[in-house]
Amino acid sequence: MTSPVTTPDGTGATAPGRLYGVGLGPGDPELMTVRAVRALAEADVVAYHSARHGRSIARSIAAAHLRADHIEEPLVYPVTTETTDHPGGYRGALEEFYAEAADRLAAHLDAGRTVAVLAEGDPMFYGSYMHMHKRLADRYVTEVIPGVTSVSAAAARLGTPLVEGEEILTILPGTLPEEELTARLASTDSAVVMKLGRTFPAVRRAFEASGRLPEARYVERATMAGERTGDLAGVEADSVPYFAVAVLPSRIDAPRPERTPESGEVVVVGTGPAGPLWLTPETRGALAAADDVVGYTTYLDRVPVRPGQTRHGSDNKVEAERAEFALDLARRGRRVAVVSGGDPGVFAMATAVLEAASQDAYADVPVRVLPGVTAANAAAARAGAPLGHDYATLSLSDRLKPWEVIATRLRAAASADLVLALYNPGSRSRNWQVGKARDLLLEHRSPDTPVVLGRDVGGPAESVRTVRLADLDPAEVDMRTLLIVGSSQTRWVERGDGRRIVWTPRRYPEPEQPA
């Protein structure tokens, strides 16, 4: 117990007490740590949160370690839902409550008493204690005692690994908007969704929309009386309490669903212009769910290796063969992701797959195309907003169409004063098209027209420069470069930080009216 101490100046003032944030674990009192029990033994005051009915789960966990001489401070929430007549609304009511509760604890601390604030699970993990910590820890000596979280308890009770190797664990509150939950569930390896109860119907729909419902497990009151576990898909919504979690366990060594010819599909995904930062959540989910990943080796190397998946890399010039290979796998019941750079529908693999899928032999194979960030959008964003008005997208490669067709389309787009995004402008063996395109465009555009050269955007060798159309040098352009040629309205300026930005105004000048 704490007693008054005399300060060196002889005033007899009482030293402030010590604050403990005590993690109690998920519910079973035997999962309290030795340090937590010791902190309770040192405490003069034991504080715990409860609803207005007065019952406290935290207190019930620690009950065996409470003494008759402990001063108990129940911190009773004024509201437990977002409905309140407080002038500041739900948040205002809670802020007022936390401030008042902190003042009550501060009074004990100022009197020299040691205060232990009980917290289910871990104090710093979605715990109520942290609201006291933020208001008091800068004023008093404080120790936070970690506890076993409900996440760890749920995994233990399920008896299945939660994450393994290089898998990623995502922890989500069920109060997130349903679409946000769906996106995050689709893109992660493993997940735990907490705070269920009234959020359960939306959480379940998010699991279903993300394609993860068959994997999802359910744990209610882990390690406590009334514990329940099972498959999430079979849980009735009206039976779910707040103290329940939904779990996506590790996929490593998890049983793969039995495949039948009817279960096969091909998903064509875009990986964006470079690495993982450019992947969409939907694409991440499709890649993670695939049995087989098929693609040009350079793009396939951007996809993380996952246990249980088979990877099929090939050369860049066998698109038709790659498409048929993927469709043959799907026809045998495999879930296949065909990997493409950028957006799969922009000069990429979606066309090849859909063309092959139109054959009678593959008429029953489901095919989906998922969008990705295309090179034009990536380069434009790095440069500013050169695609802010109407623009045309062309490929300068004459491997699949004659140069005469390219030249005709360049003239048409240039005469229409469209901004141009030019893909595949050149390679080691082919760069004459860049010079031809420049000369053709100069027939319609000012020599001062800005041209953005975006090379390896998003990659380690990224380079984004802007030059005058008249100064465009074919020798500086290769297959990893995308060109954006401005219209007559495109502007470029150097800002105070030395960065040159390019944009095309959204408003086009009105035609001059005759006098």
Image (cartoon, helix red, strand yellow):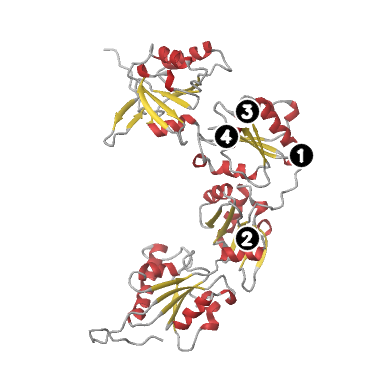
Looking at marks 1 and 4 on the same chain, the residue that comes earlier in the sequence is marked by 1
Q: CA distance from mark 1 to mark 4?
A: 28 Å
The front one of 148 and 218 is: 148
Q: Which mark lies nearer to you, 2 or 3?
A: 3
Q: What residue do we see at 67% from left, 43% from top?
A: 309
Q: Which mark lies nearer to you, 1 or 2?
A: 1
Residue holding disc 1: 261
The front one of 402 and 301 is: 301
Query: Which amino acid, by three-letter code, is at mark 4?
Result: Tyr
Q: CA distance from mark 2 to mark 4?
A: 43 Å
Q: Residues within 10 Å of mark 1 (few under 14, many from 20)?
A: some
- The answer to whether residue 248 shows anywhere in this view is yes
Q: Is residue 171 above or below residue 111?
A: above
Residue holding disc 3: 315
Q: Quadrant of residue 300?
A: top right
Q: CA distance from mark 2 to mark 3?
A: 50 Å
Query: Which amino acid, by three-letter code, is at mark 3?
Result: Asp
Say if mark 1 contacts mark 2, CB within 8 Å: no
Say if mark 3 contacts mark 1, CB within 8 Å: no
Q: What residue do we see at 70% from left, 29% from top?
A: 324
Looking at marks 2 and 3 on the same chain, the residue that comes earlier in the sequence is marked by 2
The front one of 389 and 466 is: 466
Looking at marks 1 and 2 on the same chain, the residue that comes earlier in the sequence is marked by 2
Q: Quadrant of residue 264?
A: top right
Looking at the image, residue 376 sits to the left or right of residue 237; the answer is left
Residue holding disc 4: 299
Q: Which mark lies nearer to you, 2 or 4?
A: 4
Residue holding disc 2: 237
Query: Which amino acid, by three-letter code, is at mark 2?
Result: Ala
Q: CA distance from mark 3 to mark 1?
A: 28 Å
SS category of the residue bearing label 1: helix
